[in-house]
Amino acid sequence: MNPSIHATALVAPGARVDSSVTIGPYTVIGPEVTIGAGTTIGAHCVIEGRTTIGRDNRIFQFNSLGAIPQDKKYAGEPCELVIGDRNTIREFCTFNIGSPGGTGVTKVGDDNWIMAYVHLAHDVVVGNHTIFANNSQLAGHVEVGDWVILGGFTVVHQFVRIGAHGMTAMCSLLFGDQPPFVMSQGQPAGARSMNFEGLRRRGFSADRISAVKAMHKALYRENLTLEEAQKRIAQLPERYAEAQPDVDLMLGFLAGVSPHRGILR
């Protein structure tokens, strides 16, 4: 027995657990689970299904990772949960595997800080460097971009997307796509501003921030249609050449907006 695996933990035959992994008391690891080097898992966790966990993650006690989706149509198909590297997952989180009605994979990237009681339903995709405050709840097929911050008790409707560098206030309820850089608040949530302070902290230059301000104006302050706003945003690199990647990020996101959901207004 690996001395880093507590004597009361149950690791099923077939599980691939690196010799440097630490597993706490009464935790259960299923036969199709893979856990990378340096990861620590607290007491009373259940990690099951086709779940792959990368390196140097900190998984606290009382988590359920890799359970089947809360989807009545699920019939045992070989779906997965994939978690990247260096994530912190606090107590009482529930991450489900994907579903055959989606990509079949629920995916969490790298360097995310996920607080207690967070739920990731089937086929959710989370990027890198995000922060999910306590009780953030994501329904099936939700996509969350890099550097997003979700305030406590944020609830996100199925198939909704949240663009990179966005932020939600506490108790926000999202029914539409939230474009990159946007800060939202309310029930239902509406766009309130852009995450300018977060961009400054990440090293965005004054010109890039000015371009983001111009995007906000086009989307929310000039009574333009979404198509008109996209055309206005596409012209911004003529004034702010440094902001071309930010403009591309916004236009790429807006191109994928569902006509049934639209964007937060």
Image (cartoon, rainbow, N blue to C red):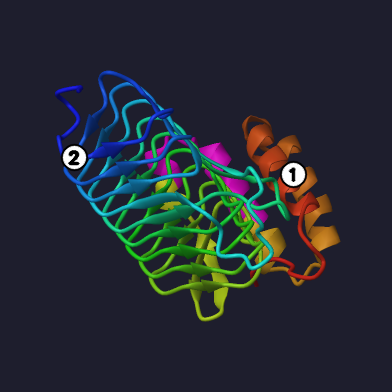
Give, as a three-letter code, the residue at label 1. Gly
Residue 151 on image: x %, y %? 39, 63
Could you tell me which residue is drawn at 56 percent across and 58 percent down?
69
- Which residue bears the numbered disc 1? 252
Would you say 254 lies left or right of 16 here?
right
Q: Report if residue 214 lies within the magenta region.
A: yes
Please state which of the two labelled residues, at mark 2 or mark 1, is closer to the viewer: 2
**Residue extending farthest front:** 13
Determine if the magenta segment contains residue 249: no
Could you say which is closer to the camera, residue 213 or residue 5? 5
Q: Which residues are magenta?
A: 199-215
Q: Earlier in the sequence, mark 2 or mark 1?
A: 2
Which image quadrant: the C terminus? bottom right
Q: Position of residue 67 (x, y in %)?
A: 47, 53
Position of residue 34 in the picture relative to residue 223 (left or right): left
Farthest residue toward the top?
19
Crowding around mark 1 (Cα neighbors within 10 Å: few <14, some 14 to 19, many 20+) is few
Between 159 and 49, the one lying in front of the other is: 49
What residue appears at the point 44 percent right and 68 percent down from the top-left corner? 154
Q: Which mark is residue 12?
A: none
Residue sitting at 63 percent across and 42 percent down?
Answer: 78
The quadrant of the image that shows the N terminus is top left
Q: Secondary structure at mark 2?
A: loop
User: How far across and how far down the image is residue 177, in percent?
Assistant: 66, 62
Please tell me whether residue 180 is drawn above or below residue 57 in the rendered image.
Answer: below
Q: Amino acid at mark 2?
A: Gly
Question: Which x, y percent locates residue 140?
Answer: 60, 60
The residue tagged 2 is 24
Q: Main secondary structure of the magenta part?
A: helix
